[in-house]
């Protein structure tokens, strides 16, 4: 561990496997995800690695992790910038259950909301500051971004064959580019100490898997209360960029996890877009 609160220089795959086995031995709350785990010092994008593995038949719950991504990306095509060894950069491959006949492909909106809540819950015990979720799934401390999530689907024969969950978490202290310096933070900055990335990964997989399974079984019904308790945007003036530019006051989410935006006296439903503070 770095004396300055940074992450370990190299992720210890064997240590993570030990922690995963120990939690499974406890027979309580252990994730099924995490095996196999594919690790590399550098890759283009862990999401691309997971999508390629999906085409070759990789199993649901497979995890792809790297110290550095040369073409890592966030939502809306933005680059994800992180110093090597100072973040958790991972993707999880999921094989969703087939949708009932005639219902169309499963919606990823509720899934992304569930993932954001899981990441927030996993990181909250490590932070001295309260963490929130900025719709649809960024994890924030105040207005500073701690973690980002990108979900991508792979279609086959008109159905969703695989969903890849890409997660980037700032763990150790790092030098963010000037344009991000005031908008990003890390667990080390929030706690003043170093953290085991192996334990963090285990906690993230545990909390995210729990909520994804709950979402698959029961929809968003039980998760909506959790989101509303940690909604970073509620009653805030915001701008939304998407199919069109909108400005208004965020009024939470509807029962499908879509953003409710009050603009010019009317509440509109936003199902995708990028939200900025006003």
Image: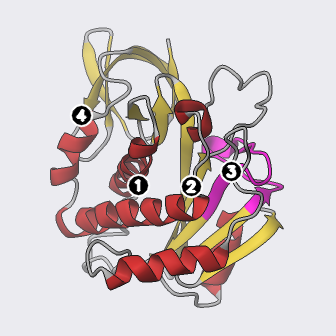
The alpha-carbon separation of the residues under discs 3 and 4 comes to 30 Å
Relative to 199, residue 224 above or below: above
Expressed as whole percent of the image width and height from the top left, the position of residue 78 reads 70, 41
Expressed as whole percent of the image width and height from the top left, the position of residue 49 reads 70, 72
The local secondary structure at tag 2 comes to strand
* Residue 259 seen in the current view: yes
Residue bearing mark 3: 7
**Mark 4 vs 2, N-terminal side:** 2
The alpha-carbon separation of the residues under discs 3 and 2 comes to 17 Å
Expressed as whole percent of the image width and height from the top left, the position of residue 53 reads 65, 82
Residue bearing mark 4: 229
Q: Which mark is residue 115?
A: 1
The local secondary structure at tag 4 comes to helix
The local secondary structure at tag 3 comes to loop
**Mark 3 vs 2, N-terminal side:** 3
Residue bearing mark 2: 167
């Amino acid at each position: 561990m770095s004396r300055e609160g940074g992450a370990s220089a190299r992720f210890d795959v064997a240590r993570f496997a030990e922690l995963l086995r120990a939690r499974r031995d406890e027979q309580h709350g252990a994730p099924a995800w995490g095996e196999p785990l594919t690790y590399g010092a550098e890759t283009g994008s862990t999401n691309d690695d997971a999508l390629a593995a999906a085409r070759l038949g990789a199993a649901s719950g497979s995890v792809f992790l790297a110290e550095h991504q040369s073409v890592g990306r966030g939502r809306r095509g933005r680059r994800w910038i992180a110093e090597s060894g100072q973040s958790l950069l991972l993707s999880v491959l999921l094989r969703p259950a087939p949708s009932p006949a005639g219902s169309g492909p499963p919606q990823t909106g509720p899934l992304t909301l569930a993932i954001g809540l899981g990441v927030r819950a996993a990181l909250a015990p490590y932070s001295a500051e309260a963490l929130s979720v900025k719709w649809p799934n960024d994890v924030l401390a105040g207005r500073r971004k701690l973690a980002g999530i990108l979900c991508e689907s792979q279609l086959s024969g008109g159905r969703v064959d695989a969903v890849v969950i890409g997660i980037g978490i700032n763990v150790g202290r790092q030098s963010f580019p000037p344009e991000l310096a005031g908008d990003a933070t890390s667990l080390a900055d929030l706690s003043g100490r170093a953290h085991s990335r192996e334990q963090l990964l285990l906690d993230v997989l545990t909390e995210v898997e729990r909520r994804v399974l709950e979402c698959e079984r029961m929809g968003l019904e039980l998760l909506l209360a959790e989101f509303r308790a940690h909604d970073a945007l509620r009653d805030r003036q915001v701008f939304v960029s998407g199919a069109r530019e909108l400005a208004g006051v965020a009024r939470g989410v509807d029962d499908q996890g879509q953003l409710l935006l009050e603009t010019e006296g009317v509440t509109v439903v936003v199902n995708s877009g990028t939200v900025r503070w006003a």
